[in-house]
Amino acid sequence: MPSSDAQQDGDGFPATAPFSLDFLKTFTWEGSFKPKLEAIKAHLAASGVEKAHLIGFCFGGWPVFKTLADAELGDLFASGSVPHPSLQLDQYAFGGNVVDLVAAVRKPVLLLPAGNDSAEYDVGGAWCPKSAESIRFPDMVRIHFIL
């Protein structure tokens, strides 16, 4: 639901709103993302789609990885792309282990880290799956990646 604040910047929050990890924690895999992705999968399959690609910016990379690691969802969703990945939120928001999540993904992934994103997202880094390619954008700053 968009903010009624005339000063909001298009994301539904007032432009001066601070980042809230507590708010982010309300969007769990089992309670929020997985049911939505199951519904998307059912709709796509009923429409004759046999394979689909996922794209998730920033925190959206976390559900991309969770989906690609999920045996039930992974058969339709064949690959993913993540500009400015923020997988570390698996640990900080949900008590998970980023290395374990990354190891569970065996499908093709394209990581597009910004210049100030962790080097762990580069090929060979702990947060880059063996099935992944990583192309760094050194002149991009994480907050401005999608502008």
Image (cartoon, rainbow, N blue to C red):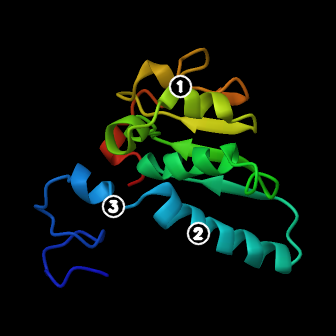
Residue 125 vertical placement versus 110 (above, below): above
Along the line of sight, the residue nearer the viewer: 49 or 114: 49
Residue at image coords 66%, 74%: 39
In the image, 147: left or right of 108? Answer: left
Query: In the rendered image, which quarter contains the C terminus?
Result: bottom left
Query: In the rendered image, which quarter contains the N terminus?
Result: bottom left
Answer with mark 1 or mark 3, whichever residue precedes in sequence. 3
Q: Which residue is mark 3?
A: 26
Q: Amino acid at mark 3?
A: Thr
Q: Which residue is mark 2?
A: 35
Rendered location of residue 11, percent (x, y): 30, 68
Q: Which residue is mark 1?
A: 99
Distance from Cα at disc 3 to Cα at disc 2: 14 Å
Residue at image coords 72%, 55%: 53
Q: Secondary structure at mark 3?
A: loop
Labels 3 & 2 near each other (Cβ < 8 A): no
In the image, 63: left or right of 39? Answer: left
Q: Secondary structure at mark 1?
A: helix
Residue at image coords 23%, 68%: 9
Distance from Cα at disc 1 to Cα at disc 2: 24 Å
Answer with mark 1 or mark 2, whichever residue precedes in sequence. 2
- Binning the other alpha carbons within 10 Å of mark 1 as few (below 14), some (14 to 19) or many (20 upward) gives some
Answer with mark 3 or mark 2, whichever residue precedes in sequence. 3
Q: Amino acid at mark 1?
A: Val
- Binning the other alpha carbons within 10 Å of mark 3 as few (below 14), some (14 to 19) or many (20 upward) gives few
Distance from Cα at disc 1 to Cα at disc 3: 22 Å
